[in-house]
């Protein structure tokens, strides 16, 4: 009995030691794996995550008024926005503008308030030039808030209008949904309620709709052209298939600007397409294929077609051709066998290609700008405009952030569709 107990204890001890050794080995493997992945993780964090985080943060930042007019905002705290502000607010505004020696900060303040009310830039500039309101420091310190009020109204009568003070008080926070709302054709009124912008200023929802329509049409065209081409390539012998794939990938080796310039030459009134159509007698006058939506569709479909063919071809190569032949041998019509047996097995390639092409299409800028007209400008055009022309980083980041959100929604939908397909399979 004692011998059996000792043997059992030794067995339990050896089993415990074995478990500890296994855990140590697994911990070492995990550590090695983390060390191998760490450089890539750091790279993605610095190059991808941090810039996107900065973009999303900049879309809601609103620092111009807070940093330039701290005394004024402190005085306006609790103001009901329905009656004129107190005289102390005028005194605080004068003190803020007097101490605002930084021209860049003053310009940022003027630009920000000018977005709220057109003409505010000149109002801030005129008031800043009038500072200080008195000749010497002692006299200026002796001015009462009521006297400061009168002097500011004397500089510009608009300082007596409540709407200009409401614009200042509305921006009392360093963070605001202003740019995000503006990107959706909405704004906050004088009391903070979300309302639609004026009808003549509502352009961005139409731009987003146009962007998604162009992306959808280009995706459908690429799918209609890419699916039969990918199917044909998948049926070729390996050597011929590789040759055709090289031809498909040639656009990757050519600059987008070169391809767009080539399409301008091909689609113009005296280009190859119109000459061929006129020469064949199908038309008697050149078609308008440039600087409109048609040219955008043709060029973008040509550029993005390889992104549709590659995932389709990779999936089609893995589908055994015997399945379709077996369905035909059992009495199915060839088209029915293709539709019911072959095509469902290519859904992953269709989904991946469609998602990839659509996401790339909605972010295009150069092609619509060069081949399209004023009604073909997409969201990326306005992102570039606010970044390079007006230097309005908040609006550019808000538009880019909404485009990123749409992309993430597409990824989520695709992920759920993929999971549901796998569960049904």
Image (cartoon, rainbow, N blue to C red):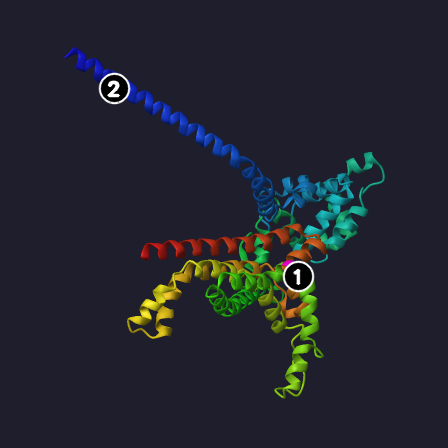
**Residue 39 within the segment the image draws in magenta:** no
Foreground of the two, 334 or 389? 334
The residue tagged 2 is: 11
Using the image as rendered, state which of residue 130 and residue 250 is in the foreground.
250
* Residue 406 left/right relative to 300: left
Q: Secondary structure at mark 2?
A: helix
In the rendered image, the vertical position of residue 282 relative to residue 78, given as above or below: below
**Magenta span: helix, strand or loop, mainly?**
helix
Q: Quadrant of residue 346?
A: bottom left
Q: Residue at x 85, y 40 (%)?
A: 135
Front-lying residue, 288 or 102: 288
Q: Residue at x 21, y 13 (%)?
A: 6
Sequence-wise, the earlier of marks 2 and 1 is 2
Above or below residue 386? Residue 285 is below
The vertical placement of 355 against 176, above or below, is: below
Residue farthest top in this picture:
2
* Image quadrant in which you'd find residue 104: top right
Q: Quadrant of the N terminus?
A: top left
* Horizontal side, residue 70 vs residue 127: left or right: left
* Residue 93 picture quarter: top right
Q: Is residue 72 left or right of residue 317?
A: right
Is disc 1 placed on a helix, strand or loop?
A: helix
Q: Which mark is residue 256?
A: 1
Q: Which residues are magenta?
A: 253-257
In this rendering, does residue 208 appear at all?
no
């Amino acid at each position: 009995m004692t011998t059996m107990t000792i043997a059992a204890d030794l067995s339990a001890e050896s089993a415990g030691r074995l478990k500890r050794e296994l855990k140590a080995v697994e911990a070492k493997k995990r550590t090695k794996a983390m060390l191998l992945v760490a450089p890539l993780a750091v790279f993605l964090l610095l190059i991808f995550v941090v810039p996107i985080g900065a973009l999303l943060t900049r879309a809601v930042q609103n620092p111009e008024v807070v940093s330039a007019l701290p005394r004024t905002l402190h005085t306006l705290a609790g103001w009901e926005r329905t009656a004129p502000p107190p005289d102390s607010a005028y005194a605080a505004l004068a003190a803020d503008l007097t101490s605002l020696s930084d021209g860049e900060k003053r310009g940022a303040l003027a630009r920000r308030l000018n977005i709220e009310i057109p003409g505010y830039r000149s109002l801030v500039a005129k008031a800043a030039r009038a500072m200080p309101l008195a000749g010497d420091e002692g006299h200026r310190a002796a001015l009462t808030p009521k006297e400061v009020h009168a002097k500011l109204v004397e500089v510009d009568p608009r300082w007596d209008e409540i709407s200009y003070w409401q614009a200042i008080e509305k921006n009392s926070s360093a963070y605001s949904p202003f740019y995000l709302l503006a990107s959706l054709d909405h704004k906050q009124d004088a009391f903070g309620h979300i309302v639609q912008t004026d009808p003549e200023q509502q352009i961005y929802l139409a731009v987003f709709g146009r962007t998604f329509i162009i992306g959808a049409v280009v995706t459908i065209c690429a799918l209609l052209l890419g699916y039969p081409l990918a199917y044909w390539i998948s049926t070729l012998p390996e050597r011929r298939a590789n040759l055709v794939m090289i031809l498909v990938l040639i656009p990757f080796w050519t600059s987008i600007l070169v391809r767009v310039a080539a399409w301008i030459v091909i689609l113009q009134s005296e280009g190859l397409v119109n000459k061929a159509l006129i020469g064949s007698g199908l038309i008697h006058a050149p078609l308008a294929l440039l600087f409109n939506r048609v040219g955008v569709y043709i060029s973008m479909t040509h550029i993005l077609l390889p992104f549709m063919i590659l995932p389709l071809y990779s999936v089609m190569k893995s589908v055994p051709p015997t399945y379709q032949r077996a369905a035909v041998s059992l009495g199915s019509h060839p088209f029915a066998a293709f539709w019911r047996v072959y095509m469902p097995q290519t859904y992953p390639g269709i989904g991946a290609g469609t998602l990839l092409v659509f996401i790339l299409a909605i972010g295009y800028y150069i092609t619509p700008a060069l081949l399209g007209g004023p009604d073909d400008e997409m969201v990326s055009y306005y992102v570039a405009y606010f970044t390079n022309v007006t230097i309005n980083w908040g609006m550019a980041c808000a538009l880019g952030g909404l485009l990123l959100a749409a992309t993430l929604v597409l990824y989520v939908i695709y992920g759920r569709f993929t999971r549901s397909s796998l569960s049904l399979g």
